[in-house]
Image: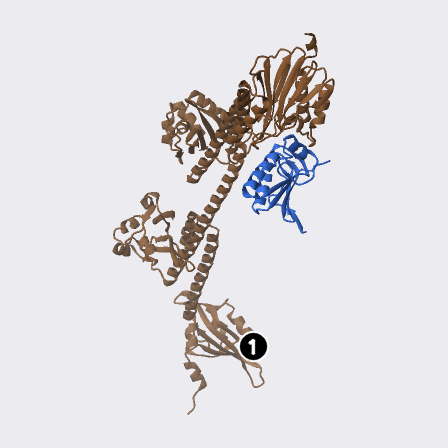
Amino acid sequence: MRTDPAEVLARLDFPLGITRGPQHVVELLNAAAREVLGAGEVLGRPIREGLSEAAGQGLVALLDEVYRTGRPYQDPAQRVVLRRAGEDVECWFSVRHRPLRGPDGEVLGLILQAFEVTELHRAHRHDLRLAEAARARSAALQELAEALSSAATPAAIGELAATRAADLLGADAANVFVTADGGLEQVHFRGWTQELTAPYRRLALQRGRPLSDAVLTGVPVWLESAEQWRARYPEMAPVHGAGGYEASACLPMRVEDREQGEVRDLGGLVFSFRAPRQFSVDEREYLVTIASLCAQSLDRARLYVAEQRARSVAERERDHTAFLAEAGLLLDAPMSVEARLQRLADLAVPGIADWCAVSLVRGARVDQVAVGHSDPQKVEFVRRLQERYPPDPHTPGGSIQVARTGVPSFVPEISQELVAAAARDAEHLELIRSIGLRSIVTVPLQVRGRSLGSLSLVQAESGRRFDEADLSFAGELAARAALALDNARLYEQQRSIAHALQSALVPAALPEIPGVRLAARYLAQAEGTEVGGDTYDVYPGATPGQWAFMIGDVCGKGALAAALTALIRYSLRAECGHGLAPAEALRRLNAAMLGNALPGDLRFATVVHGTLRVDAQGADVTAVNAGHPSPLLLRKGAVEPVLPAGTLLGVYPDPRLVEGDVRLRPGETMVCYTDGVTEARGADGGLYGSSRLSALLSDSAGCSAEEIAETVVADVVAFQNGSLRDDVAVLVMQVPADRATE
Amino acid sequence: MSSAERPAEGDGTDDGGLRVTREDVAGTLVLRFTGCLDLNGLPVAEREVRAAEEYAPAVLLLDFSTLEFVDSSGVRLVLQAEERAAAAGRRLRVALGTGLPRRLFQVLGLLDRLDLAEEPPA
């Protein structure tokens, strides 16, 4: 049985044709092909005529090419526009054209194959579109992630989430919340009116609300229509509906911290749509990814904020410490109290505060003594303001009240009401307002339970606000200032005590002794609080015509030295009044010193003590030197030490105390001095020494007692360039040269 | 005889130019003072003497012979150290040299009261 090939071909259900010659004369075209072409009878005619409706699409040119080159042509999806049912229809064919060769291989014609794949192609195009959409989303996610990486605040992150994500999804509204204080706080919204969202700026986290449910469970809530809203959240549905929205996606923003082993809920996102919407798996995944990106970003922001806060706290701490150190130096500077406090106020602005003021308690009054602001005109403005409207001493928390009560006052945020309450009248209010007070802290200057005044720090135009840390810093600063004030006060007190004590250690005036000229000098080492240990005295003896003198030096300085000096001066006065000879008087003094010594406080003294009996031709001196620099006798231009050496007092129970006699004749002078003279050192460290003193005295022959005392002291002061290292005392006793002729 | 010299603790010149070194010479602990011993140098000097006393040496020698300057602060230092040595049954010696330190102690009548570590000058 034979089968006609043409018959078989004709029955194939895919279009097939055979052409012959360069004009592509159709030899065979099966039914399927005819159906596609929709053409009439083309057998025996060039195919161009059968493809008239496909003219201009380059189809014949393709056939020409295959016929000419003999190379097959193949296209799995060739687009052809065909006219079907009176309409141009885009069709796709999988085509394959091959040459039909003769016995010698020459091209005789073409075998054409075309299989319509329009349906297949359309389906493929949909896949492509899906793929394209997926690619776009992935790019959008990448872009969002990038943008989020530079968003530092929850508000910025919220805005990105709302705008970018909503745009990509075609959401009509978005609402972004972050967790705060156990609830949710709105950080961004769009597509909602202020009125509608206003009541929902802060949400309590409670089950039964779509976003709360999502946040609390960590699972998104999908509401695809108003119906679903009403069914699942009946009480919230009207609110959502009022915005004109149908569908919503409520997504938790949550971060799982594997390292810490914890889950952090950071907030939630709500996207709303005006039309009902079925959230496809892809869309759901996409939205969850957006929420997750935002959550990570929020977490980073949270850490960033925490880190910033920690850093700024550390920086402020460091600034405060540096400031306190600087303030400490300044407060100890050798200036008046007012000048120091003004410097402190100037130092505090504008770094620590915009304004700084200090008030001091002065008896019944509290005076503002320092005001600091970086603009002197503002300082002047406030000065005038206070002149016109003196501060009310009874204002609670005012600088005067704080200074009086010692109770600090802290107003972190000054309200308009507070300003209004403080104003006396409308103009006053206007003037206070112009200062722009924001925040104020007033602390007492308290030391040892006493309040000496108050210190106020004020923030104004900078917009800064004080917090608890500033309050404690202000307290520390005030404590230092108060301590410095107290020290200054104590210093003044000590100086006046020292002055009083010092004046008790030497007589206010020397007695007048007929036939003897006396002169004395006493120089304290420095204008200070330390009382020196030098002393001298001249006073009447036990019997008429007899006088007593002493010069002494107690080791050390200060109150204990001063007390011992006083003991020496007054003991000798008393012993002498009892008629005791100098050696015996000193022995008793030594015993008294040993008896009065404080344990561990070894103090010794050196003393020259003697009596003076004046007669017509001069004076007899009987004296004892207890470890003191030898008095010098100036006689006819020569200088010689007198009196036997002895032992200092206050250390040994048996000091060597030997009386020596000196006869002072007219023109002769006895000079007693303390080691502040001979032990004086010059700038180069050189010692003044006894030889320089001797030379000076030698040159002073013929000078009066007064002149000699003055010369010695002036020379010692000059030798030390005006700054004494030790107290200096000089006592000069002279029998005038003209005494014999009197 | 071994002799190891080293700066004592708290050695410094911030105290009016006083420098103290400690040296152990054949069982005698020697504190050698150089520079200036006045009120400014006293705290350092006292600290060094106290530190030396911690070793409870049988003999502690305060060598003032190389001091450029000494005043009643140095005298007080010696007298107090002597008081403590007497109470503790130790011996305190002082070297004064021939210059200012000797003159100071001489004026105060202390040369025959102290355990001096050298022959008085001829």
In what element is the residue under mark 1?
A: loop
Question: Disc 1 designates what residue?
Answer: A71
| Residue positioned 74% across, 20% down in the render | A638
Q: Is residue A147 left or right of residue A587?
A: left
Q: Image quadrant of residue A514?
A: top right
Percent from the top left, x then y, of residue A487?
A: 50, 30
Colour chosen for chain B: blue
Q: Is residue A438 left or right of residue A607?
A: left
| Residue positioned 67% across, 34% down in the render | B102
| Residue positioned 40% across, 65% down in the render | A86
Extreme residue toward the top, this view: A742
Q: Image quadrant of residue A420?
A: top left
Q: Say few, some or many: other residues with alpha carbon within 10 Å of mark 1 (under 14 / 14 to 19 / 20 or more).
A: few
Q: Nearer the viewer, residue A273 or A520?
A: A520
**Chain drawn in brown:** A
Percent from the top left, x then y, of residue A524?
A: 59, 24
